[in-house]
């Protein structure tokens, strides 16, 4: 996980800073340093000098930088500003050229994100389990969290905010959970009705990622049996369909889905009962003794294995979808940040740092997942860098736009103070998100 995160950051940071570097050089601006990762306290893993630029790799993999001559940046080096501007310095160039230099990194990340998304769609296509397959196999299995939203086990999800639900992930997608009002149309016991999600839906979903509100149900077809388990001793075989149990006093309990097993067997640990099955169109009853864990010891067939939809697209359509999804992700991040600022979403549920991001890559290197997450991070990096916070590209862009409006440069003391304030804010934010990541690991 750490290796994949560092590899993704290395790609994103190098190309982001390369955008600044190439734009600066195109306008004849001197670039003193080009570093992948931060060489905090002067500690460098590798460096060399070519021409007027020092290239290197720092030890702290939280970003990178290019040191552009004549610019107040995160190095807070103001010595060069005490002399008259030289024609190869950032401050000597027209505001429009400096603006291009500052947005070049964001532009590269935007283009990279769209490219990776598009090529991922072209190479791997879209793969998902249609909601119809879930509805046709008993609907959803609801957890305690799902019950808070008004769902019941067996519900069939039809639509969300008026749009048909094609896959179950739709109800957790940003374009749904960030809406002010969320209405879900379901079918329950043959009747269609509408559930209105509570105002804190997004907070509850985001803070309970280990317990989704619901999942698909699995009919009780036996796939394989564990040796010496109650199911093995009872003689259950692959292909058997469990229909229920005959308990004490000939009390019959019908069972059709995996989520119903635990409730049906409660109170019958270490007690002999009968399991009713269907085998080769014949009904049988077999004696079985459940252990203390209430587990029978068999694996359920995955009835959805052959229901997964796989759609491939041509190159043009892939780039169309990649572009649409990329801007959709950026818009969702902007909405999400707005709701964090207004207090609708708790910051600890919405903001994630490097520790949490690393877990998304998984313990096994999967190229499809790697490039998809790299694309997402590239777009988030583009969005975050455009925020008007000093020390970020967006902060420089903000001051440059003001300069272009008023017709004169911003006072250097003001720029320096703003840069310091921005760095303090970003450091505090980094401490918060990393601390929040660690807290979640032990939650």
Image (cartoon, rainbow, N blue to C red):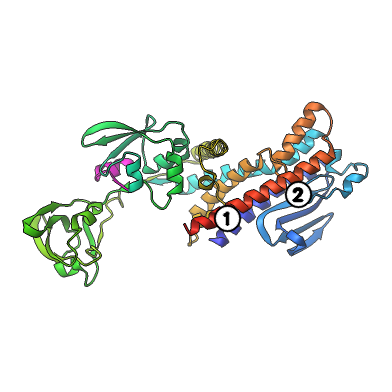
| Extreme residue toward the left, this view | 249
Q: Are marks 2 and 1 in contact (CB under 8 Å)?
A: no
Q: How many marks?
A: 2
Q: Residue 392 in magenta?
A: no
Instruction: Give the residue at x 71% y 60%.
Output: 58
Instruction: Give the residue at x 40% y 47%.
Output: 127
Classed neighbour count for the residue bearing mark 1: other residues with Cα under 10 Å, few (<14), some (14–19), many (≥20): some
Percent coordinates x, y for residue 259 in the rendering = 26, 52
- Identify the mark at residue 183; answer none if there is no mark: none
Q: Residue 132 in magenta?
A: yes
Q: Which residues are magenta?
A: 131-143
Above or below: residue 224 compared with residue 134? below
Quarter holding residue 402: top right
Quarter holding residue 199: top left
In this rendering, position of residue 155 left or right of residue 204: left
Percent coordinates x, y for residue 303 in the rendering = 27, 52
In this rendering, position of residue 187 left or right of residue 182: left
| Extreme residue toward the bottom, this view | 228
Q: Earlier in the sequence, mark 2 or mark 1?
A: 2
Instruction: Give the residue at x 45% y 48%.
Output: 207
- Residue in front for this viewpoint, 291 or 49: 291
Instruction: Give the residue at x 38% y 35%.
Output: 197
Residue 343 seen from this side: yes
- Identify the mark at residue 74; answer none if there is no mark: 2
Classed neighbour count for the residue bearing mark 2: other residues with Cα under 10 Å, few (<14), some (14–19), many (≥20): some
Select label 2 or label 1 by which is in front: 1
- Residue in front for this viewpoint, 35 or 243: 243
Q: What separation in Å lies between label 2 and label 1 (alpha carbons)?
A: 23 Å
Percent coordinates x, y for residue 138 in the rendering = 24, 45
| Extreme residue toward the right, this view | 84
Percent coordinates x, y for residue 6 in the rendering = 60, 58
- Identify the mark at residue 435; answer none if there is no mark: 1
């Amino acid at each position: 996980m750490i290796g994949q995160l560092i590899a993704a950051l290395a790609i994103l940071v190098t190309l982001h800073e390369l955008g600044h570097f190439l734009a600066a050089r195109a306008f004849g601006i001197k670039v003193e340093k080009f570093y992948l990762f931060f060489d905090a306290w002067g500690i460098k893993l590798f460096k060399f000098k070519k021409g007027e630029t020092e290239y290197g790799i720092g030890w702290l993999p939280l970003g990178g930088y290019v040191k552009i001559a004549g610019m107040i940046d995160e190095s807070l080096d103001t010595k060069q500003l005490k002399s008259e501007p030289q024609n190869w310095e950032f401050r000597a160039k027209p505001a429009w050229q400096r603006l291009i230099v500052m947005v070049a990194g964001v532009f590269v990340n935007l283009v990279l994100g769209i490219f990776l998304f598009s090529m991922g769609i072209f190479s791997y296509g879209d793969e998902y389990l249609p909601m119809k397959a879930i509805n046709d196999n008993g609907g959803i299995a609801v957890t305690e969290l799902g019950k808070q939203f008004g769902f019941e086990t067996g519900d069939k999800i039809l639509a969300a905010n008026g749009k048909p639900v094609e896959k179950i992930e739709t109800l957790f997608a940003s374009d749904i959970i960030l809406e002010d009002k969320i209405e879900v149309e379901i079918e329950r016991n043959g009747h269609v009705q509408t559930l209105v999600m509570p105002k804190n839906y997004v907070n509850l979903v985001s803070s309970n990622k280990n317990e989704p509100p619901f999942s698909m149900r699995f009919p009780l077809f036996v796939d394989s049996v564990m040796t010496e388990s109650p199911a093995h001793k009872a003689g259950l075989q692959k292909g058997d369909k469990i229909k229920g149990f005959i308990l004490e006093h000939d009390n019959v309990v019908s069972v059709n889905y995996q989520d119903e097993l635990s409730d049906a067997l409660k109170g019958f640990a270490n007690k002999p009962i009968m399991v009713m099955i269907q085998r080769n169109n014949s009904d049988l009853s077999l004696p079985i003794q459940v252990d203390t864990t209430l587990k029978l010891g068999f694996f359920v067939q995955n009835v959805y294995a052959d229901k997964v939809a796989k759609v491939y697209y041509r190159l043009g359509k892939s780039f169309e979808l990649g572009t649409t999804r990329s801007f959709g992700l950026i818009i969702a991040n902007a909405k999400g940040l707005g709701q964090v600022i207004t207090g609708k979403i708790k910051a600890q549920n919405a903001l994630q740092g490097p520790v949490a991001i690393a877990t998304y890559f998984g313990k096994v290197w999967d190229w499809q997942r790697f490039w998809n997450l790299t694309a997402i991070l590239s777009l988030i990096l583009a969005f975050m860098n455009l925020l008007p916070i000093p020390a970020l590209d967006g902060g420089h862009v903000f001051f440059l736009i003001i300069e272009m409006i008023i017709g004169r440069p911003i006072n250097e003391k003001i720029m320096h103070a703003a840069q310091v304030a921005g760095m303090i804010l970003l450091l505090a934010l980094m401490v918060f998100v990393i601390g929040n990541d660690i807290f979640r690991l032990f939650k």
